[in-house]
């Protein structure tokens, strides 16, 4: 929502910003799509964090709980370059190799 307001200000749309600040019913109408979008992203994040937590139980050095993973993502600390994610990717490659060998 902050980005939306900042974008409106940068566009010079001060009437929109005033409506958001002073008209609760208008703000409520605007919030509905934001909430829907947030719920969808939160669901996807939860699913991804669950997968990472389950994978971390299977042989990586730095195990993480789902709560730790979730917080690291929200803080921007868990990226594709993170050591934890690199370990998981190595584990994935190893598991794929094992599957090909056993077939």
Image (cartoon, helix red, strand yellow):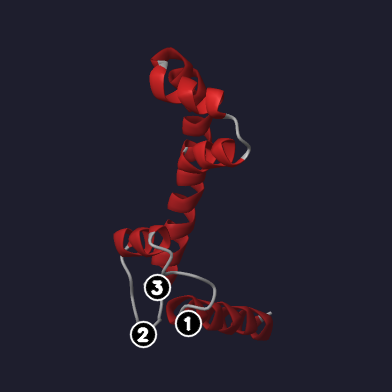
- Return the x and y of residue 60 as percentages of the image width and height: 40, 81
CB under 8 Å between callouts 1 and 3?
no
Q: CA distance from mark 3 to mark 2?
A: 8 Å
- Return the x and y of residue 76 as percentages of the image width and height: 43, 64
Establish if 21 lies above or below 6: above
Q: Is residue 63 left or right of residue 17?
A: left
Position of the C terminus by quadrant: bottom right
Residue 56 is marked as 3
Residue 87 is marked as 1
CB under 8 Å between callouts 3 and 2?
no
Residue at horizontal 41 percent and vertical 75 percent from the top: 58
Pick the residue in front: 31 or 69: 31
Q: Residue furthest top?
A: 25
N-terminal-most mark, 3 or 2 = 3
- Return the x and y of residue 69 as percentages of the image width and height: 37, 64
Residue at horizontal 46 percent and vertical 41 percent from the top: 2
Q: Which residue is mark 2?
A: 61
Q: CA distance from mark 2 to mark 1?
A: 8 Å
N-terminal-most mark, 1 or 3 = 3
Sort mark 1 into few (<14), some (14-19) or many (20+) by Cα contacts within 10 Å.
some
Pick the residue in front: 6 or 46: 6
N-terminal-most mark, 2 or 1 = 2
CB under 8 Å between callouts 2 and 1?
yes
């Amino acid at each position: 929502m902050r980005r939306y307001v900042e974008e409106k200000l940068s566009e010079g749309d001060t009437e929109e910003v005033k409506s958001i600040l002073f008209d609760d019913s208008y703000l409520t109408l605007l919030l509905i799509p934001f909430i829907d979008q947030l719920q969808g992203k939160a669901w996807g994040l939860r699913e991804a964090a669950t997968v990472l937590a389950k994978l971390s139980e299977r042989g990586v050095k730095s195990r993480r709980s789902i709560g730790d993973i979730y917080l690291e993502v929200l803080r921007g600390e868990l990226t594709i370059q993170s050591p934890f994610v690199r370990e998981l990717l190595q584990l994935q490659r190893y598991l794929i190799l094992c599957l090909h060998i056993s077939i």
